Image: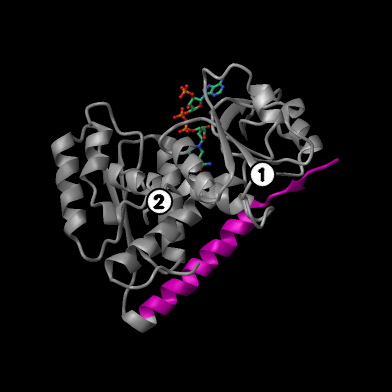
């Protein structure tokens, strides 16, 4: 059996186009242009690439992009002052602080200082709590993207056995909440899980968010299962060149799974598309307009 490949790149492009169309409608009907501020502290090369890509896609979707690049030596008070300015700026509907932050800055303090209404990464404790209690919230982008990808395979996730590998605040925990809201039966695995292979073999849906290259093996996958691979790991190939691999041994798993996301071009592009969607949602909520139907 060879799995259907879930083309995250194409699905993300469709979502970005739908967000762009809604942005145009808002602009015409309400003279409202959503604005996203992205704050990068320091020179981390991977973060710089992400931030460039986010800014480019924001503009392509018809939104305003505000780019703040601060030196590595920036102090916590200075960053908090910028956050306070952005919180108060009516042209800014979404604020994203690119992680990781340099060690002199307490990331939790900075995330906690964001206006929850503009917290488009969904990391503020208020949004995490609202998600956990089933209230409307801004939800972290990667898990939202994972659910959207899974739903391209299953019209409903209700009753399916879902395994989430990883319990980070950014991916695993919000994903668990979203799966519960979809009425899936959820198992969570982490570094202390005793028999991960056995847990995996029971799952109709596997979400791998670990950060360990190709850890999930093909013989762990239940035949026909849907596999969503969140991991992004840079490894050196036999030819000495770097390449990206996921947390799932793709070639092996694709022989057994019913559907699988590749790495790259799987979950990654959906994360940015969902960031644009969150910015649109934030702009509508702040303006007192109905939730967009994208
Ligand atoms: P974290 O390092 O914050 O969390 C990793 C999780 O994996 C932890 O819960 C940890 O368990 C668990 N874990 C570690 N080793 C094992 C193991 N041997 N067996 C089972 N579980 C294990 O990572 P993130 O959640 O931030 O990211 C996970 C991956 O997803 C990374 O590769 C990251 O690059 C990628 N990522 C991709 C994104 C995208 O847009 N595609 C966005 C965000 C992340 P414990 O809690 O016990 O330590």
In this view, the residue in front, 19 or 219, is 219
Q: Residue furthest bottom?
A: 29
Q: Looking at the image, which residue is at 19% across and 41% down?
A: 79
- Magenta-colored span: 1-27
Q: Position of residue 78 (x, y in %)?
A: 15, 41
Q: Is residue 97 visible?
A: no
Q: Is residue 73 left or right of residue 240?
A: left
Depicted 269 relative to depicted 24: above or below = above
Q: Which element carries disc 1, helix, strand or loop?
A: loop
Quadrant in which the N terminus appears: top right
Q: Is residue 247 visible?
A: yes
Q: Which element carries disc 2, helix, strand or loop?
A: loop
The numbered mark at residue 261 is: 1
> Which callout, 2 or 1, points at the residue further toward the start of the chain?
2
Residue 256 sits in quarter: top right
Distance between the alpha carbons at the discs numbered 2 and 1: 28 Å
Depicted 183 relative to depicted 60: above or below = above
Q: How many marks?
A: 2
Q: Position of residue 7 (x, y in %)?
A: 67, 52
The numbered mark at residue 126 is: none
- Queried whether the magenta region covers residue 36, the answer comes back as no
Q: Looking at the image, which residue is at 19% across and 61% down?
A: 89
Depicted 166 relative to depicted 24: above or below = above
Residue 43 sits in quarter: top left
Q: Residue furthest right?
A: 1
* Magenta span: chief secondary structure: helix
The numbered mark at residue 134 is: 2
Q: Position of residue 111 (x, y in %)?
A: 27, 41
Q: Position of residue 161 (x, y in %)?
A: 64, 39
**Neighbourhood count class around disc 1 (C-alpha, 10 Å): few under 14, some 14–19, many 20 upward:** many
């Amino acid at each position: 059996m060879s799995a259907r490949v879930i083309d995250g790149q194409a699905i993300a492009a469709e979502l970005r186009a739908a967000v762009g169309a809604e942005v145009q409608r808002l602009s015409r009907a309400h003279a409202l242009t959503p604005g996203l501020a992205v704050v990068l502290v320091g020179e981390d090369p991977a973060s710089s690439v992400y931030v460039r890509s986010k800014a480019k896609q924001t503009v392509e979707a018809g939104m305003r992009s505000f780019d703040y690049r601060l030196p590595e030596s920036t102090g916590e008070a200075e960053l908090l002052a910028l956050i306070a300015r952005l919180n108060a700026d009516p042209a800014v509907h979404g604020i994203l602080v690119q992680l990781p932050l340099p060690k002199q800055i307490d990331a939790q303090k900075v995330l906690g200082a964001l206006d929850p209404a503009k917290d488009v990464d969904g990391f503020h404790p208020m949004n995490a709590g609202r998600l956990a209690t089933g209230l409307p919230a801004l939800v972290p982008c990667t898990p939202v993207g994972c659910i959207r990808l899974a739903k391209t395979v299953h019209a409903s996730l209700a009753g399916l056995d879902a395994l989430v590998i990883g319990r980070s605040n950014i991916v695993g925990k919000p994903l668990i909440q979203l799966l519960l809201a979809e009425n899936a039966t959820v198992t969570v695995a982490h570094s202390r899980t005793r028999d991960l292979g056995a847990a995996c073999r029971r799952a109709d849906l596997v979400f791998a968010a670990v950060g360990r290259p190709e850890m999930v093996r093909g013989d762990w996958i239940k035949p026909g299962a849907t596999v969503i691979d969140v991991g992004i790991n840079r490894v050196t190939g036999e030819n000495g060149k770097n390449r990206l691999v996921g947390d799932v041994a793709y070639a092996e798993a694709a022989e057994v799974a019913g559907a699988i996301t590749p790495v790259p071009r799987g979950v990654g592009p959906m994360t940015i598309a969902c960031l644009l969607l969150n910015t649109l949602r934030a702009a509508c909520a702040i303006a007192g307009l109905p939730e967009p139907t994208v």
